[in-house]
Image: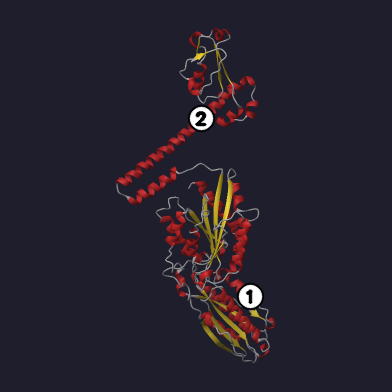
């Protein structure tokens, strides 16, 4: 390449090797010869030496200098201008050589790591083809999945959009948990510890965009009221406005009703949500459903629930032909993961197991989508499927009602309280309950014996007479001890408290309580004793308190919904899939 006075030749680094810059211009030679300016720091010292050798060719004169940008050093060698400024100018070149050596060592380590990974992938590829040649289908599928996962690692994006659909069980059995569900959603979407704030804390280099969809669901027999969804004028189901989503959840949870049996159509809800078809639905980078329920899906009740009447109206087949597999297929096809938030883990365990199994075994689930279980009760209060909760046993409520002469003015209030309690049990889908009634004055008579909740009489006759507690306690305890194994006894005792034998009755009840706890061997088994006063007017606060206590398990926001669903499964395992 000819060097001529007054000319500047620009070239890339490739011309630093093997190119002869020869000079026939005497003016250039007279003024010092060809001058080389290198404007980058070579990663290899050998390249720098070669570039220097492009001048002073064939005994000619020449010169060389290096001019660098601080920003280039920071970008290519990860050193700042501040570091350079600490070094005396005369030592800059030595400092640059040290920078180059450090960078070279890092590159060597990276090459070794890449070589190890490439060797591992090569081995996995050979093993995969060996399995194919051996016609081992199961092993080859597993090896292909592992190989695919080891290769599919995209670079971290600068922004991530997340679709989160909230599926809220709005049936009557959720009444005790409705406000807890609202609190959980509030902690997830509103305030200082939201899902997006936790994501930003864990992944500060990524900008997050959260879209919320909402679906309230009831059971199959609720007909047109089965699904209530947040839907916009353009037919889309997701919104960026968390206040709109939260208001919808509050409305859904304000009126829990319906359900009819113990099982609910959770599978139908999952299928319905996965099948949202608007062009703007399920379009984000990461997609999740969060199901909040206390009930198992149809066909998946705990085995002990077979002892309960009205447990599952669709235990064999869903009327629409839906199955757990079909729901999972719909979710897998759209890359949706599921958080199952259970207010009764004992009741929903089989449902969660079945969903997990179908996710794990689904042939199209290469990205390994699945179910994350979130128990919505404190760890110590998690019940097994043999508990008195909805998923296992019913309740045998034994009313012990004072019909002595002193109760004559208040008998109508007692009967009204009795009917209100039964109505509340029906509202909370406790149709498997049994009801017994003992009425007493100086003696005691059993007027209702182990009747289903639906057959409990509304009217109770009044007799009048003197007052004695012990005969009534004896009969009530006998009925409690006759409670079927499928139920747990609960005694409600109402009187004005005027009897001389109250201490004898109390000992009878305490003895029964010990017997029941010893027999049931369960913290969830109980024998409730309510001493009602005749002057309740119709203020039924004590009955209402009992109604709340016997089903309600205190629900926390579950450590801010288990640290916002483990920060969305650590952002779907750092966007691996």
Q: How is the image coloured?
A: secondary structure
Q: Residue at x 48, y 73 (%)?
A: 311
Badge 2 is on which residue? 105
The answer to whether one can see residue 471 in this image is: no
Q: Nearer the viewer, residue 206 or 561?
A: 206
Badge 1 is on which residue? 544
Q: Residue at x 65, y 53 (%)?
A: 192
239 lies above or below 307 = above
Q: Position of residue 384 (x, y in %)?
A: 50, 66
**Residue at the extreme left:** 134
**Residue at the extreme front:** 234
Q: Are marks 2 and 1 in contact (CB under 8 Å)?
A: no
27 lies above or below 316 = above
Measure how far apart labels 2 and 1 are at the Cα level: 74 Å
Q: Nearer the viewer, residue 177 or 159?
A: 159
Asked which secondary structure carries label 2, the reply is helix
């Amino acid at each position: 390449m000819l060097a001529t006075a007054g000319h500047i030749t620009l070239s890339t680094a490739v011309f630093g090797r093997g190119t002869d810059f020869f000079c026939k211009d005497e003016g250039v030679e007279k003024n010092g010869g060809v001058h080389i300016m290198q404007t980058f720091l070579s990663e290899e010292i050998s390249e720098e030496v070669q570039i220097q050798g492009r001048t002073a060719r064939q005994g000619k004169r020449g010169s060389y200098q290096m001019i660098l940008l601080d920003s280039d050093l920071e970008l290519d060698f990860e050193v700042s201008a501040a570091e350079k400024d600490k070094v005396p100018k005369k030592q800059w070149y030595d400092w640059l050589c040290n920078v180059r050596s450090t960078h070279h060592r890092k590159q060597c380590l990276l090459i070794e790591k890449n070589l190890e990974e490439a060797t591992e992938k090569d081995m996995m590829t050979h093993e995969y083809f060996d399995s194919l040649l051996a016609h081992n289908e199961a092993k080859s599928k597993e090896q292909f999945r592992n190989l695919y996962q080891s290769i599919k690692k995209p670079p971290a994006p600068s922004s991530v959009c997340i679709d989160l659909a909230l599926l809220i069980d709005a049936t009557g059995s959720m009444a005790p948990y409705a406000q807890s569900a609202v609190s959980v959603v509030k902690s997830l979407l509103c305030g200082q510890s939201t899902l997006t704030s936790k994501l930003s804390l864990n992944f500060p280099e990524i900008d997050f965009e959260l879209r919320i969809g909402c679906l309230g669901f009831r059971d199959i027999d609720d007909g047109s009221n089965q699904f209530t969804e947040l839907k916009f004028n353009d037919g889309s189901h997701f919104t960026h406005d968390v206040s709109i989503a939260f208001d919808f959840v509050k409305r859904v949870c304000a009126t829990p009703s319906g359900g009819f049996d113990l099982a609910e159509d959770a599978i139908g809800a999952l299928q319905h949500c996965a099948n949202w078809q608007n062009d703007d639905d399920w379009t984000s980078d990461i997609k999740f459903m969060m199901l909040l329920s206390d009930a198992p899906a149809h066909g998946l009740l705990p085995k002990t629930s077979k002892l309960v009447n009205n447990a599952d109206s669709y235990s064999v087949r869903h009327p629409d032909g839906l199955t757990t597999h079909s729901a999972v297929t719909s979710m897998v096809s759209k890359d949706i993961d599921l958080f199952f938030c259970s207010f009764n883990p004992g009741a929903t365990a089989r449902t969660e197991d079945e969903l997990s199994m179908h996710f794990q075994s689904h042939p199209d689930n290469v990205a390994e989508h699945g179910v994350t279980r979130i128990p919505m009760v404190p760890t110590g209060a998690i019940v097994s499927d043999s508990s008195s909760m909805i998923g296992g046993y019913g309740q045998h409520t034994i009313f012990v009602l004072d019909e002595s002469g002193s109760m004559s003015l208040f008998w109508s209030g007692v009967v009204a309280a009795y009917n209100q309690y039964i109505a509340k049990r029906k509202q909370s889908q406790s149709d498997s309950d049994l009801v017994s009634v003992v009425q007493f004055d100086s003696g005691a008579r059993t007027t209702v014996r182990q009747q289903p909740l639906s057959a409990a009489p509304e009217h109770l006759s009044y007799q009048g007479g003197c007052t004695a507690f012990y005969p009534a306690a004896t009969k009530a305890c006998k009925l409690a001890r006759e409670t079927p194994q499928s139920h747990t006894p609960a005694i409600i005792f109402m009187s004005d408290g005027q009897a001389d034998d109250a201490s004898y009755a109390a000992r009878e009840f305490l003895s029964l309580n010990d017997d029941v706890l010893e027999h049931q061997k369960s913290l969830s088994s109980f024998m409730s004793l309510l001493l009602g006063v005749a002057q309740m007017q119709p203020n039924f606060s004590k009955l209402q308190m009992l109604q709340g206590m016997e089903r309600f398990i205190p629900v926390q926001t579950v450590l801010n919904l288990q640290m916002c669903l483990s920060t969305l499964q650590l952002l779907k395992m750092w966007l691996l899939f």
